[in-house]
Image: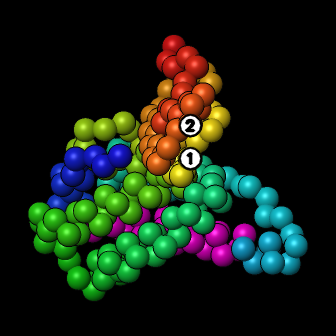
Amino acid sequence: MVEPLSIAVLTGVALTEGIKFLYGQSDAILKRRAETRQAAARGEETPAELIPVQTPDVIEGRLQPIRIDPDAAEELADVLKDLRRRLEDYAQGYETPSDGNLDVLRATQELRNAIEDVIGQRITFRGENRASSGTPVVTGRLIAQEIEGRAAAVYVEDARSGRVDGELKADKVSDGGEASAVRITKLGH
C-alpha cells in the first residue's frame, strides 16, 4: 500500500536525523540477515532475539525492542540495500538534503516502509499524521498464479491494536477457491 508522502513534514535537521536513524536500522537488519545466512550455511540456527533500540527525538512515540523477521529481511534485502545507497551521502553527513526534495523524501519513506515490514512496528516522525512509533503493524503480500483452495495474504486472529496491510495478486482463482488479502477474526476491543 502506498501512503501519501506524510514524511514531507520533515525538513532540515529533522530530515537528516530521520535519514540517519533509518540508515542505522537498515544496517542492523542487513547485518542480522548476513549472520543468519552464515549460521545456516554452517548448519546452525540463529535464535530470534529482541534488539533494544534508542528512539531519537525526531521520532514520535517509542519503539519497542525490535525482533527482525528473517523472511521479510530476506525478501526486502535488495530494496533496503538500494535505498541505503540512495540515502548514504545524507546519512553519512556528506550532503544535506534540501527541503522538499521529493526524491529524498520518497526514498526516505520507502526505506521506512521496508523497515516497518521487517520489524513489525510503526516508525513515525514528529508532525506526521499516522499511528505512533511502536504501534504493531502486520504486512502481508501474496502473489500467485493460481489459487485452488483458500489463501490469505494476512490472517490475524484477535488483533487488539495496530495496523494490518494485505495485498493479494492472483492470475486465477479456481472454482471453489477463496482468496483474501486480509482475513481477521475480531479486531479491536
Depth check, front residue: 62 or 116: 116
What residue type is disc 1 on? Glu
The residue singled out by tag 1 in the image is: 146
Farthest residue, direction top: 189
Q: Are marks 2 and 1 in contact (CB under 8 Å)?
A: yes
Quadrant of the rendered image containing residue 90:
bottom left
Residue 30 magenta-drawn?
yes
Residue 152 appears in the picture as rendered? no
Helix, strand, or loop for circle 1? strand
Residue 92 appears in the picture as rendered? yes
Horizontal side, residue 154 vs residue 103: left or right:
right
The residue singled out by tag 2 in the image is: 174
Q: Residue at x 51, y 13 (%)?
A: 189
Helix, strand, or loop for circle 2? loop
Q: Residues within 10 Å of mark 1 (few under 14, many from 20)?
A: few
Boundaries of the magenta span:
15-36
